[in-house]
Amino acid sequence: MSEKRDTDRLYLDYAATWPMRREVWRAMEVELDRGFNPASAHTPGRQAHRQLELARGKVAELLGCERSWVYFTGGGTLSDNLAILGFTRARERSRVFVSQIEHKACLEAAERAADEGATVEIIPVDETGTIDTGWLTRELGAETGRPTLVSVMWANNEIGTVQPMDEIVALAHERDALVHTDAVQALGKIDVDMSRTPVDLLSGTAHKLGGPVGIGFLACRTGVELEPLSYGGGQERSMWPGTQNPLGATGLAAALELAIGEREAVSSRWIELRDHLEARVLDEIPGARIHGGDAPARLPQLVSVGIPDCDSGAVLVSLDMEGIAVSGGSACGSDSGAGSTVVDALGLEDEPPYTTVRFSFGHETTRDDVDRAATALARIASRVSALSV
């Protein structure tokens, strides 16, 4: 148990940001007096560089990859952009395949790639949010000889669907395509190992793991050529130039090590909480549904609930007023006012208007927390639904 609990408020939005864990802070605190520029040639600079490389080595070990594959960046979005735009800008006539339910960091990077001349194909998903591998197989084989990247999120950040990455990698590699995965939500929740599932590019970030905001990474296999997105220095082997962040990298490595080390022990408890919450929601809220609930594989700590005939803003604000912090989906889309492209992709166009509420658990989440949230949601949904009639 590491996060400080506020007895008046209940935080169930760990998929947006996991509050920094005390163990991570302690690991970073040790290095506070070494916060120098790791590119400097003097002794303090060399000490900072050593700390940066220790963190790089730890991240590589935990990912099952080589140290030289790991590039530190400013976060998951930046890593996704580097993977997709770095690939297309390094190759003429390139193709990019992205799924309907990717994070905006990948979808909008693909849109920019299309503006710059790349061909972008959207991979359809079924009603559970699982990609159509048959469609992908056919389309990859329809045109050969062009540089091709398949970018598929390992685990969806809004509905929790886990994609069949082993199958995706195998079919892509058979057709000489490379594979990028946004593993931001998957890391620390399910088994992610590049030595067993040989994706070519993998993006991650610290703040989804209880680490600091503003540090992420891209793991890129040797031989995969990328064009840098910015210029002005040789840091990160010129792939991500600018002053490096050894303190952030230390926090990232510590958070990743904690999450992976505790994953098996906490996953079974998360699944019990997830199943209990879903059972209560389906039993107590008429017409409620669980997005991605029938998927072959799901994240253990995430629940996306659909409630008909309710206003999304009213439900979320009411929960917040009761001290319960949740979200309607991706935090990156919360300011846009638009609906969820992920939920839309599940084929629910003919359903009545309804709101989406996403719950996501942390290490300290208890059954009492889940019961409190379920009770509040059922009461609020009944009140909001009555007001909308």
Image (cartoon, rainbow, N blue to C red):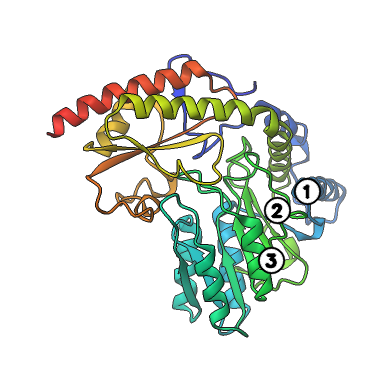
- Name above or below for residue 87 compared with residue 36: below
- On the question of residue 320 being in view, the answer is no
Pointer 1 with pointer 3, Cβ within 8 A: no
Identify the residue under disc 3. Answer: 239
Residue 229 placement (x, y as % from top left): 59, 68
Q: Nearer the viewer, residue 205 or 177?
A: 177
Q: Quadrant of the C terminus?
A: top left
Q: Residue furthest left?
A: 389
User: Going from the N terminus, do you reach mark 3 or mark 2 first?
Assistant: 3
Q: Quadrant of the N terminus?
A: top right
The amino acid type, in three-letter code, at marker 3 is: Met
Residue 349 placement (x, y as % from top left): 27, 54
User: Going from the N terminus, do you reach mark 1 or mark 3 first?
Assistant: 1
SS at circle 1 = helix
- On the question of residue 298 being in view, the answer is yes
Crowd class of label 1 (few under 14; some 14 to 19; many from 20; radius 10 Å): many
Crowd class of label 2 (few under 14; some 14 to 19; many from 20; radius 10 Å): many
Distance between the Cα atoms at labels 1 and 2? 8 Å
The amino acid type, in three-letter code, at marker 1 is: Leu
SS at circle 2 = loop
Q: Quadrant of residue 356?
A: top left
Pointer 1 with pointer 2, Cβ within 8 A: yes
User: Going from the N terminus, do you reach mark 1 or mark 2 first?
Assistant: 1
Identify the residue under disc 1. Answer: 52
Q: Residue at x 56, y 75 (%)?
A: 140
Does residue 375 appear left or right of residue 295 in this picture?
left
Identify the residue under disc 2. Answer: 244
Q: Nearer the viewer, residue 139 or 51?
A: 139
